[in-house]
Amino acid sequence: MTSSLFADEHLLFDPVTPDNDAIPVIFAFPNEYTVGITSLGYQIVWATLATRTDLQVSRLFTDISEQLPRQPEILGFSISWELDYVNILSLLESLNIPIRARERSTHHPIVFGGGPVLTANPEPFADFFDVVLLGDGENLLGDFIDTYKQVRGESRETKLKALAQVPGIYVPSLYQVEYHSPDGAIKSIQPISSNVPATVQKQTYRGNTLSASTVVTAKAAWESIFMVEVVRSCPEMCRFCLASYLTLPFRTASLEASLIPAIERGLKVTNRLGLLGASVTQHPEFNTLLDYINQPKYDNVRLSIASVRTNTVTKELAATLAKRDTKSLTIAVESGSEKVRKIINKKLEQDDIIQAAINAKTGGLSGLKLYGMVGIPGEEAEDLDATIKMMLDLKKAAPGLRLTFGCSTFVPKSHTPFQWFGVNKQAEKRLQLLQKNLKPKGIDFRPESYNWSIIQTLLSRGDRRLSKLLELTRDFGDSLGSYKRAFKELKGQVPDLDYYVYDNWSHEQVLPWSHLLGPLPQSTLLKHLAEAMSFVEAPAKELEPSV
């Protein structure tokens, strides 16, 4: 089983032969191989490690692994989904490594983690990691390995203190969190000694050569796809959006130096091409890129594009995708209400949305998927009516186009202007209202699980006290009921579920990630928040933060 999966891989880089005294490293993805190997982030880090002669790298997934070293010195995890923490704990146990960092001794490996989940807010998982890499791996990874080499023979404590000096490397055990009470808010977060930095700044790669697949395999969840990152971050800065705020500034891959050479390399081994990025069509040379892909020599290429900005959906784009075996396109509109779109800074007119549907149909696509959200701060009942009306108007404007409306509940995210808000308690009812009004009209309504949004919020706004809770829910199962049961069991030791999920937090309080700096200072986030709230007609009581 193992060998056949790895044997099926087309490598687009040359792994090197490790030196005799190379550092034994395990690089893990806490999910099955088919899921992990589809993660571009995982692929890039693995290739970066596997092209260093000073490292001996083995991959580990929940279902298979390469041959693992007996005494690994470094164990890394790439984390893309919050709920994969369960698998991290299981993999640590399978390797006979204590799941809590403080219980590890000198002979255990340094356990590090990286990826979007940990960069956003590592605190609920902080007790399980020795080291967390905050931000882009391009520079961070090399700095991490190079610093480790300098202290390789030293004690665990010396290693961790040395690593903590590297920009972007966060060592949770070197920070002390104080609370007003065991189940109260955070009082302070301080380094345990003066030679540990008081804050850790997320690292941002500013080059114009972005990522591209390092491996193509038919066994990936997206079968035989070659992925290329066209843009990183998003210039739109919707107020709730982690993908925009946490990854600033907006960067574009160079067409000549990065994109075209990468695509040529990838299309030698497969005919499936995926263009990735939060707002792919906003690359300044996107039309030139499209012309390049439209060459006759690529007529058999199947093209997929991540979500595109609504007002960039042209007939030409739709026609190119239809010709390349894509049946539908995805756009994020968030709401049919102009007021709500202003609150969240979604620079989009109703006409743009209608035109996108018409262009999609005229260009030959059979479907259009729209992303929406309920429970956005400031949203009222009439805003839901506007969303229903928008969907029905689209149906009228582009008859025969299959419309899908995927809708989630607003989840507050760290480092965004909406991080101080809780979830709207009416959100579940609002999802049901949309379902009731859209389904009978032939619109495929796909709500994201409200319970999953609650769990996501808990992990998104959580602090270190949640590590006990996560260990309990692991035994109870991953339903919301399990989390509620764990809260009951830990009553008095952690704040209640409402504190993390539903409460609006004071702008003055210490946030779990206050010592971990994103691209923008809190003062800027508060300015953006004030701007958003200026569009709320009468500031509702529910929008005032609790003290």
Image: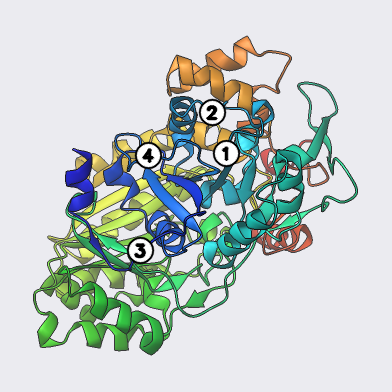
Q: Marks 1 and 3, Cα distance to the nearest angstrom?
A: 23 Å
Q: Nearer the viewer, residue 530 or 321?
A: 321
Q: Nearer the viewer, residue 391 or 242?
A: 242
- Residue 109: assigned label: 1
Whether the residues at callouts 4 and 1 have beta carbons within 8 Å, the answer is no
* Left or right of residue 281: residue 273: left
Q: Marks 3 and 4, Cα distance to the nearest angstrom?
A: 40 Å
Quarter residue 489 falls in = top right
* Left or right of residue 522: residue 462: left
- Quadrant holding the N terminus: top left
Q: What SS does tag 2 mark?
A: loop
Amino acid type, callout 1: Pro
Whether the residues at callouts 4 and 2 have beta carbons within 8 Å, the answer is no
Task: Say which residue appears at 41% left-offset and 56% top-offset.
Answer: 46
Whether the residues at callouts 3 and 4 have beta carbons within 8 Å, the answer is no
Lower sequence index among marks 1 and 3:
3
Task: Say which residue appears at 19% left-offset and 65% top-offset.
Answer: 398
Lower sequence index among marks 4 and 1:
1
Q: What SS does tag 3 mark?
A: loop
Q: Nearer the viewer, residue 137 or 47?
A: 47
* Left or right of residue 378: residue 226: left
Residue assigned mark 2: 97
Lower sequence index among marks 3 and 2:
3
Lower sequence index among marks 4 and 2:
2
Crowding at dot 4, Cα within 10 Å, few <14 / some 14-19 / many 20+, comes out as some
Residue assigned mark 4: 448
Lower sequence index among marks 1 and 2:
2
Residue assigned mark 3: 15
Q: Marks 1 and 2, Cα distance to the nearest angstrom?
A: 8 Å
Q: In the image, residue 239 lies at what x, y percent?
A: 59, 58
Q: What SS does tag 4 mark?
A: loop
